[in-house]
Image: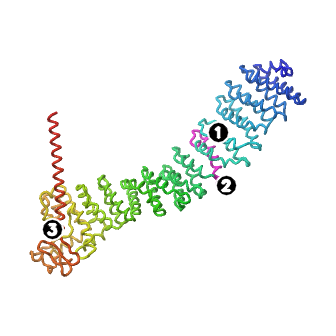
Amino acid sequence: MAEALSVIPASVLRNLSDKLYEKRKNAALEVEGIVKQLAAAGDHDKISALINLLTTEFTYSPQANHRKGGLIGLAAATVGLTTEAAQHLEQIVPPVLNSFSDQDSRVRYYACEALYNIAKVVRGDFIVFFNQIFDALCKLSADSDANVQSAAHLLDRLVKDIVTESDQFSIEEFIPLLRERMNVLNPYVRQFLVGWITVLDSVPDIDMLGFLPDFLDGLFNMLSDSSHEIRQQADSALSEFLQEIKNSPSVDYGRMAEILVQRAASPDEFTRLTAITWINEFVKLGGDQLVPYYADILGAILPCISDKEEKIRVVARETNEEIRAINAEPAEGFDVGAILSIARSQLSSEWEATRIEALHWISILLNRHRAEVLCFLNDIFDTLLKALSDPSDEVVLLVLEVHACIAKDTQHFRQLVFFLVHNFRIDNSLLEKRGALIIRRLCVLLDAERVYRELSTILEGEADLDFASIMVQALNLILLASSELAELREILKQSLVNPAGKDLFVSLYTSWCHSPMAITYQHASVVIQSLVEEDINVKFLVQLDKLIRLLETPIFAYLRLQLLEPGRYTWLLKALNGLLMLLPQQSAAFKILRTRLKTVPSYSFNGDQIMGTSSGSEIGRHIPSGSQISEDGDVKQEVGKFNFGSRLQQLEQIQSQHRMHAKSRNNSTTLNSGNTKTRRSHE
């Protein structure tokens, strides 16, 4: 220090710490002159001693005016050194940078001014301190004092100029610094960071695109900033990078795709639109690189298909079509299981359009990678079954198409029908609201006879008799009234003369016994007469009412026309009169059926005409030569060989089970009611 004091007059040191700026400025000019002389003489030891004096006694002084003087003195010393300043920067720059965090705003201001003057002198040699300077400037960009902010902006512009013209700048060392700060919320810091990204990207020798994944998320984060200016700057930077990506032969799409997928779910509309636009371009440009990321991308796209903003919906649908058109293979990284998982999760979306597209994807995967999809069947089957309760008919129809595609194999077909019946059992509303739609559509997709045979097999062993009855009622109603099952009805009509019809009739009969309905006219008549008091309850009368109304629909026009020939269709007339006798006279169904029967032409017939095959009766018309009707009403023939007597016994057995079940249930209800009354009386 003595060496420094020997070259700097006491008056200069005194003025350097004066409270007046002019005196400090004049003292700094004298320091500049002294350093010039020492530099010319090559006496760098004394220069080092002088800089050390300015640092220890002034810039680190507890007195604010001393710190101000020290800063202006260091800048003056640098100016005096001119081209030789580089060798003293290790002494000069650190104390100036330290002053950027001074509690006195004026000291911070002078630190900016000092570093500005130092940088002007040393230019490129300044780069070795770039990271520390950048960190300091980042903090000062959000300084509470407007004057400090202004001074920091001036310094920032100069540093940018120096960096863009320097070949010593290290982007690899800078990126970690940038990445650490990209998620700050302060608007001034955000502007500062975007400014640096834009400037560095404009330098041809600096490859900012290669490091884009390191700060891309931060840029997207700025798109939702409350400041319009920041949003605009971030959007401008992103647009420039996207254009560079389009023109670049080598881009790391994978890392950036992960970021875009997250941002596509942003609550901010503009961020979502920008992210989905980038994803769209990536899908077009990324090629094989993006195949392993298709599941994540799909997870981002499907919700956007239902976005409230039309622009987002349009881009999302376009992107979805682009991915769908790419037929990638598992060997190429195409993860069938991951995509199935995404599609399954989106089936629970609140938006119909998203659920529909998710089903389209499952269908596509089934068609392209059936074996792989079936490996994950247990993971998606329950979800697909639950989707049958979807409020949208379009979704339900698509779910059925997927189910039908799965059920092409016998094993999966049986599994589907079994689970379908199970779902109907545990969810009565599903059977009531969707049952007809589901069964009819499956009959179209999977062959009606196959579906009905499998349903019948399952219902034969159904332990829940109430459910079995309800289910058979629903199936019979669908069979009788649905246009999709017209062919199946025709086969059953020929059951007395056609082996295929007979076989189908027999396969369905046992399950139909859970809910007696017209099977053949003669057998129906016998069934009606076999009913006992317990069978004719409210549920039975409700079913009967539905049947009478059903007979008045267009699909049963053929049956009504048969009534014009009572001699040929005697058993039909007898069955309908039997139904009339079972109905309460005041019911609407009684009046409908009685009115219909009144229109039947009068025809005189006796028992012999009913029994004879030569009378032209309905049974005689359908039975081939050699067939007979036995005394107990059984039809025996060479082709069908029906034994209606045994069928009637089978019906009676099952109906007896229903009667016993009903009695048991009623007794249980009565007992519980009695226990409740007893408890109340005790209370």
Helix, strand or loop under label 2 = loop
Which is in the foreground here, disc 1 or disc 2? 2
Q: Where is residue 322 in the image (x, y as percent from the top left)?
A: 54, 59
- Magenta stretch prevailing secondary structure: helix
Q: In this view, does 198 lie above or below 612?
A: above
Q: How far apart are marks 1 and 3 (CA)?
A: 90 Å
Q: Position of residue 336 (x, y in %)?
A: 49, 57
What amino acid type should be assigned to the residue bearing mark 2? Answer: Ser
Q: Label 1, on which residue?
A: 191
Q: Position of residue 381 (x, y in %)?
A: 40, 56
Badge 2, how many Cα within 10 Å: few under 14, some, many 20+?
A: few
Q: Is residue 222 above or below residue 10?
A: below
Q: Where is residue 624 in the image (x, y as percent from the top left)?
A: 21, 80
Q: How far apart are marks 2 and 3 (CA)?
A: 84 Å
Q: What segment is highlighted magenta in the picture?
A: 222-251
Residue in the image at 75% along x and 43% along y: 164
| Numbered circle sitting on residue 525 | 3
| Numbered circle sitting on residue 248 | 2
Sequence-first disc among 1 and 2: 1
